[in-house]
Image (cartoon, rainbow, N blue to C red):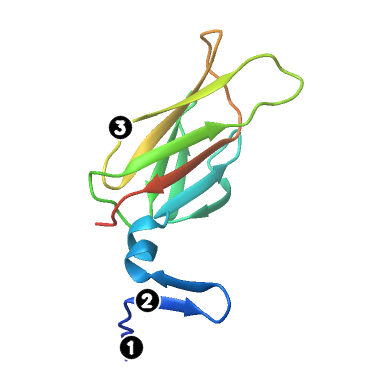
Amino acid sequence: MAGKLIADQIEHSTAGSLDTSYVVNGSAKAWVAKLDSGASAAASFNFSSFTDNGSNNTATFTNSMTSGYAVVCSADEPQPSPVARFVTVFARGASSFGMHTYTDTGGTSSVPQHAIIQGDLA
């Protein structure tokens, strides 16, 4: 039988207390450290699969999100390299979204990508 814990605050013996609404509303609902090629991740939370589409990747959630979530992405900069990398997000849906990395010279790039998802689970 599943239990239920009802609390308005979490208190630590020396670090103080925290309102539980902050934990529910302020915690990342998903995150990923994506490798530079292939359909696997180095580490992730709430992602079930990745599809390598050649010039972009599709990330699929384990637990769907509501439509109002935000994706914050970054891409690693291999050294030595003077080329900047930019990650864009597209086709954002409740169960998945796409990530594509561009270079500042107008090309595409296959480098490690990272994403943090903030919002509400469906």
Q: Amino acid at mark 3?
A: Ala
Quarter containing the N terminus: bottom left
Residue 41 spot, x, y in % from top left? 56, 46
In the shown orientation, is residue 3 left or right of residue 41?
left
Q: What residue would you read off at disc 2?
A: 9
Report, in whole angstroms, how far the alpha carbon at label 1 lies from the one at label 2: 18 Å
Q: Which percent across, then down, holds residue 116?
A: 46, 45
Q: Secondary structure at mark 2?
A: strand
- Quick one: quadrant of the C terminus? bottom left
Q: Is residue 84 left or right of residue 23?
A: right
- The reply to whether callout 3 and callout 2 are in contact (CB within 8 Å) is no
The residue under the point 24% across, 44% down is 68
In depth, the one of 40 and 66 nearer the eye is 66
Place residue 26 in its image quadrant: bottom left
Question: First in sequence: mark 3 or mark 2?
Answer: 2
**Residue topped by disc 1:** 3
Q: Residue furthest right?
A: 80
Amino acid bearing label 2: Gln
Which element type, helix, strand or loop, lies under badge 3?
loop
Q: Quadrant of residue 7?
A: bottom left
Q: Amino acid at mark 1?
A: Gly
